[in-house]
Image (cartoon, rainbow, N blue to C red):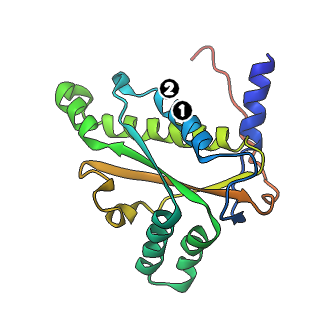
């Protein structure tokens, strides 16, 4: 039961941290971040074990360049604020990607399920995203926020394959401030044993 409590505690303490410093926390390495993310990527379930997920980590000039291009692509000043903070205040970005060629292969191989496979791929990718975010949030001083500027694929040149779709970006760095108070919706689970 203690393992379950640890997992539930990790889920509860994973929070959106917008206030970041463009550095890694003390005693946290990029290699650790990569290893944790790699383990999650490897063991996240997918339809028919198709493993359509891919991850790329951007740091340094690549991270700044991509987010500066996002800023330039947004027409309103208010819309530029979040990507500008990602460029200026974060250390790096984890890109969560789906290989659409894998999904297409499943659709061709199992036509009766064809319409469902894109949803299955996105669901699996979402599991990689939240599991990665939750695990990394347990590193002392680590902060991150999940974004969905999925049009940034065009800013990555040949680093993203033609048949790959960016699903989300986890922007990370050293936590500069704690998250605000979180409110909860009353969402009681109903148990149904007969219809």
- Residue 61 image point, x, y percent: 48, 67
- Residue 168 image point, x, y percent: 48, 53
Mark 2 packing: few (<14 Cα in 10 Å), some, or many (20+)? few
- The answer to which of 171 and 15 lies nearer the viewer is 171
Q: Do labels 1 and 2 touch, CB within 8 Å?
A: yes
Would you name the residue on which mark 2 appears? 43
Against 61, residue 122 (above or below) is: above
Residue at the far left in the pictured view: 108
Would you name the residue on which mark 1 appears? 40
- Residue 131 image point, x, y percent: 59, 37
Against 63, residue 96 (above or below) is: above
Residue at the location (79% across, 53% down)? 183
- The answer to which of 81 and 156 lies nearer the viewer is 156
Secondary structure beneath label 2: helix
Drawn side of residue 9 relative to residue 159, left or right: right
Q: Which mark is residue 72?
A: none
Q: Quadrant of the N terminus?
A: top right
Residue at the location (78% across, 58% down)? 179
- Residue 121 image point, x, y percent: 38, 37
- The answer to which image quadrant residue 191 occupies is top right
Disc 1 versus disc 2: distance between alpha carbons?
5 Å
Residue at the location (28% across, 57% down)? 158
Secondary structure beneath label 1: helix
- The answer to which of 32 and 185 lies nearer the viewer is 32
């Amino acid at each position: 039961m203690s393992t379950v409590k640890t997992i539930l505690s990790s889920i509860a303490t994973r929070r959106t941290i917008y206030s970041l410093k463009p550095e890694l926390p003390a005693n946290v390495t990029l290699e650790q971040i990569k290893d944790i993310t790699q383990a999650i990527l490897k063991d996240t379930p997918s339809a028919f074990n198709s493993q359509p997920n891919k991850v790329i980590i951007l740091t340094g000039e690549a991270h700044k360049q991509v987010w500066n291009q996002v800023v330039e692509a947004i027409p309103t000043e208010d819309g530029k604020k979040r990507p500008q903070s990602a460029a200026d205040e974060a250390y790096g970005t984890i890109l969560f990607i789906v290989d659409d060629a894998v999904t297409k292969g499943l659709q061709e191989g199992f036509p009766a399920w064809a319409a469902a496979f894109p949803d299955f791929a996105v669901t699996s990718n979402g599991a990689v995203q939240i599991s990665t975010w939750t695990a990394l949030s347990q590193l002392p001083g680590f902060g991150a926020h999940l974004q969905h500027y999925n049009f940034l694929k065009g800013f990555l040149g040949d680093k993203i394959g033609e048949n790959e779709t960016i699903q989300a970006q986890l922007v990370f760095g050293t936590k500069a401030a704690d998250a605000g108070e979180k409110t909860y919706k009353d969402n009681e689970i109903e148990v149904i044993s007969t219809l």
